Image (cartoon, rainbow, N blue to C red):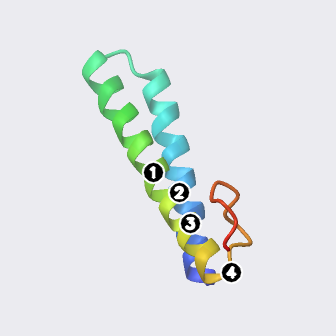
Amino acid sequence: MKDMQAQLEKLQRDSAECALIRDLATDPKKRELFARLADHLAVLASAVEQAIGESAGGEISPDLPPRP
């Protein structure tokens, strides 16, 4: 579980860094590239967060409906 949490935090940091680079980029192609990277990493982080929530019984996944 600690490994998954560490991966989640890394993906979140990487996504934030890509978003920062996107905001600082002056080249439109680079801006688009880093925007896509930031979005993709955010989706991956969300998937890891969901997996952590499922393995912990749904405690960490606020975006998911409650289990029946």
Q: Is residue 28 left or right of residue 20?
A: left
Of residues 38 and 61, which is closer to you in this image? Answer: 61
Residue situated in front as seen by the camera: 57 or 32: 57
**Residue 3 image point, x, y percent:** 56, 81
Q: Amino acid at mark 1?
A: Val
Mark 4 burial class by Cα count in 10 Å: few <14, some 14-19, many 20+: few
| Residue type, label 3 | Gln
Q: Residue flagged by tag 4: what amino acid is it?
A: Gly
Circle 3/circle 2 CB separation < 8 Å: yes
Q: Residue at x 35, y 24 (%)?
A: 31
The residue where tag 1 is placed is 43
- Residue 18 is situated, as x and y percent measured from the top left of the image, at 45, 39
Residue under numbered circle 4: 57
Calculate the distance from the C-alpha at mark 3 to the C-alpha at mark 4. 10 Å
Looking at the rendered structure, which numbered label has been put on residue 46? 2
Sequence-wise first label, 3 or 4? 3
1 or 4: mark nearer the eye: 4
Are the residues tagged 4 and 2 within 8 Å (C-beta)? no
Relative placement, left or right, of 61 versus 16 is right
In the foreground, 31 or 60: 60
Q: Secondary structure at mark 2?
A: helix
Quarter of the view holding residue 63: bottom right
Q: Are marks 2 and 1 in contact (CB under 8 Å)?
A: yes
How many angstroms separate mark 1 from mark 4 (CA)? 21 Å
User: In whole angstroms, how far apart are the C-alphas of marks 2 and 1?
Assistant: 5 Å
Q: Amino acid at mark 2?
A: Ser
